[in-house]
Image (tube, rainbow, N blue to C red):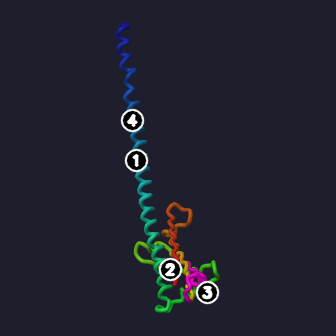
Amino acid sequence: MKADSDMTTLPTLQRGFALVTAIFLLVVIAALGAFAVSIFTTQQQSSALDVLGSRAYQASRAGIEWGAYQILQSGVAGGTFAADCLAVSPGASQVQALPALEGTLSVFGVSVACGATAASDVIAATGLPGTVTVYRIVSTASGVAGATSGSADYVERQMQVTIGQ
């Protein structure tokens, strides 16, 4: 009789072992799934910010090209941008907002700063008559859909160019 009681207790001791193993495996698989989703989300956000950074660069470049056109064609186009650049004191900048861009660049605000100095010293050193005006243009493209500086989706690019005329 004692042998029968030992036989019945052995299967009852092993009955919960499969349940513990199944719960452990479910927890491990769920943790791996959560980790994979986290990595995927981070990768998608990084890719999106990379695209926005490229667009901000192109918007800033559009500001440089606009400012250069305004300066180089000031006599032809009758624009006042070059005159406004000359009017500011040396070391200062005159800032103008670029007209709204279209398409995928429309989410960026672009400001173009310009300052100019007459470089008669350069001309005197070469022995040529006249004065060269050196313009410094700085274009800044910033903001994405109302994002503010410091937020996770804020992108800003700045370019600078010097033009002598």
Q: Nearer the viewer, residue 123 or 85?
A: 123
- The residue that disc 2 covers is 98
The mark lying in front, picked from 3 and 2, is 3
- The residue that disc 3 covers is 87
Q: Is residue 29 left or right of residue 108?
A: left
- The residue that disc 1 covers is 36
Q: Amino acid at mark 1?
A: Ala
Residue at 41% from the left image edge and 42% from the top image edge = 32
The mark lying in front, picked from 3 and 4, is 3
Q: Nearer the viewer, residue 52 or 23?
A: 52
Magenta run includes residue 118: yes
In the rendered structure, which disc, 3 or 2, sits on the residue that comes first in sequence?
3
Position of residue 22 measured from the top left corner of the image (x, y, whole percent): 38, 33
CB under 8 Å between callouts 3 and 1? Answer: no
Q: Is residue 105 left or right of residue 146?
A: left
What number is the disc on residue 5?
none
Q: Image quarter for residue 1?
A: top left
The residue segment tinted magenta is 111-129
Q: CA distance from mark 3 to mark 4?
A: 74 Å
The local secondary structure at tag 2 comes to loop
Q: Nearer the viewer, residue 128 or 63?
A: 128
CB under 8 Å between callouts 3 and 2? Answer: no
Q: CA distance from mark 4 to mark 1?
A: 16 Å
